[in-house]
Amino acid sequence: MPGTTFQDFAQLRFLLSIDGIGPVKIRNLLSSFHSIDNILEADPSALSDVEGIGIFLSKKLSEAKKTLPASFSKFEKEFSALQAHDVRAVSFFDKEYPDLLKKIYDPPMILYVKGEFTVKDDFPIAIVGTRQPTTYGKIQADKFSSELASQGITIASGLARGIDSVAHEAALKTNGRTIAVLGCGINVIYPPENKKLYDKIPNSGLLISEFPLGTKPDAQNFPSRNRIISGLSLGCIVVESGVLGGALQTAEFALDQGREVFAIPGNLGVKQAEGSNTLIQQGGAKLVRNPEDILVELELKLKPVIGKSIPKPNVDINLFEQKILTVLEDKEMQIDNIATQTGLSTSDCLVNLLTLEFKGLVKQLPGKMFVLI
């Protein structure tokens, strides 16, 4: 079973145990010193020159180094406990660490993982929502999750009551894969009524946490959990959420991380839909009516998973439009390059591209770039 070595685990845990040092500062240190060994051997003056460290943290780190033997002894027991729970530590530097998660601003240095990653887990879709969904919300979460999972797409969520639980269950019932990101230690089952779901997921997916074993599900842990849900996903679907719901927080993280955000419109006057409807109204999420909307929007990114093109609407196209579609193929292209390769004038290209947009075949991106959808 892959995972990080004890030495790497203990060194990272040691750095993370120092108050004021987190994933961003560790990456800054590694950028300067290239290895944790070099960081631990560096003198305070060299450490203080690193961005974000300064004199105060450099002294704190140097003082903490005196406790290394005792710390490593404690982490050795922790590492053994992981094995006893069939959990492994996956560091930021391990090959199996999710590539999408590596690209966010503050990826966890260590993930605690139960279950095995597969290639299908490279491009998950997150489905999140309220802990107190309406019947309509449950139906939509089940529909979107089961249909996307049946296409080979891994469904990510937070194992919370309500929409999260429905999304995980729906993925599993279609023999699909699902990832549950926890806001507590990976050996802590929360909420307790999800024990059966907790036990099933590692057989067809993964349980993931950035928190050490035994960590309680305290409220301050869930924002960190939410950034991981969005961070390891291509896009995030909000099913139902109140105006202050954690699902909206996950959507905000997704937007900050450059991920796609979608929302299913909810019934007016229902408090569980106020947040998701507002998200659509304010332009923070794209309205989706069915799972096909997600597949069309993310087709190019999902091709490695679904392995086929999404059926296009049956529409008539003229000779000039066909030329443009042939040139675009599966890549983004700037308007001047399209004109050059089709032999059409820029103005003629723009007219035909606009028509193709109306037909749902082409999408315009910033900088007069165009791409097939």
Image (spheres, rainbow, N blue to C red):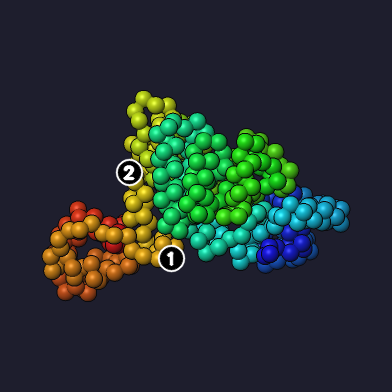
Residue lying at the far top in this picture: please name it.
Answer: 269
Of the residues shown, which amino acid type is indicated by label 2? Arg
- Rendering coords of residue 263 (x, y %): 39, 42
Report which residue position mark 2 lands on.
289
Of the residues shown, which amino acid type is indicated by label 1? Pro
Looking at the image, residue 266 lies above or below residue 147: above
Element at badge 2? Answer: loop
Image quarter where the C terminus lies is bottom left
Looking at the image, residue 104 lies above or below residue 170: below
Q: Residue at x 33, y 67 (%)?
A: 331
Which quarter of the picture shows residue 284?
top left
Q: Toward the viewer: 20 or 48?
A: 20
Q: Residue at x 16, y 74 (%)?
A: 343
**Residue 341 falls left or right of residue 148:** left
Report which residue position mark 1 lands on.
304
Which quarter of the picture shows residue 321?
bottom left
Q: Residue at x 15, y 70 (%)?
A: 344
